Image: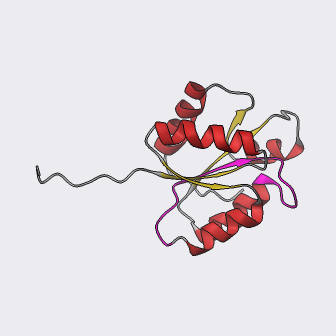
Amino acid sequence: MTGLPLISPDVILVVDDEPFVLQVVTAILARAGYEILQAASPSEALDIAEVRRDPIHLFLCDVVLPDLSGPALAERLCLLHPNARCLFMAGLRDHPEIGVAVARGHAFLPKPFVAGELVRKVREVLAAPRQSCHV
């Protein structure tokens, strides 16, 4: 052992109601070295965030989700993990919720994207100066 501190990976909560997208995004980010928590619905994401005591560093949320939009979900998640950052993704580039999130300075990644774009955007958001993730 070299005496160097162990660096734990950043933790990302990925929320998408499309099973294939959730699986692919999770696999890409896990291969990139991130610890991934995944949720297929807003209620599942809130359950995970409520019981998790260790930090969640990034919420990667689809904009269009059943029962609660991605930005509305992120607002609630940020109450539980206020130091987290937010990155929104969507295939519907003209959805009004995207404009709300982007106008407030939150990152957005349009679908479809390739693995390299996803990893680059996640790194960019995690490296940016910390700001409130509230939408």
Q: Main secondary structure of the magenta part?
A: loop
Q: Residue at x 80, y 47 (%)?
A: 100
Q: Is residue 128 above or below residue 59?
A: above
Assess whether residue 66 is covered by the magenta stretch.
Answer: yes
- Left or right: 41 as drawn, with respect to 82: right
In the rendered picture of this protein, how many numbered marks are placed on residues? 0
Q: Is the residue 125 above or below the residue 38 in the image? A: above
Give the x, y percent position of residue 48: 62, 67
| Residue nearer the viewer, 24 or 72 | 24
Q: Please state the horizontal and vertical placement of residue 118, each as a whole percent of the image.
A: 59, 32
Pinpoint residue 34: horizontal percent, then vertical percent.
47, 46
Residue at x 76% of width, y 61% of height: 42
- Residue pictured at 58% horizontal, 74% vertical: 51
Q: Is 120 within the magenta?
A: no
Taking 119 as reference, is 47 above or below it? Answer: below
The scheme the figure's colours follow is: secondary structure
**Front in this rendered view, residue 99 or 116:** 116
> Which of the 4 image quarters holds residue 96?
top right
Please report the bounds of the magenta region as a residue range.
53-70
The residue depicted at 72 percent of the width and 56 percent of the height is 135
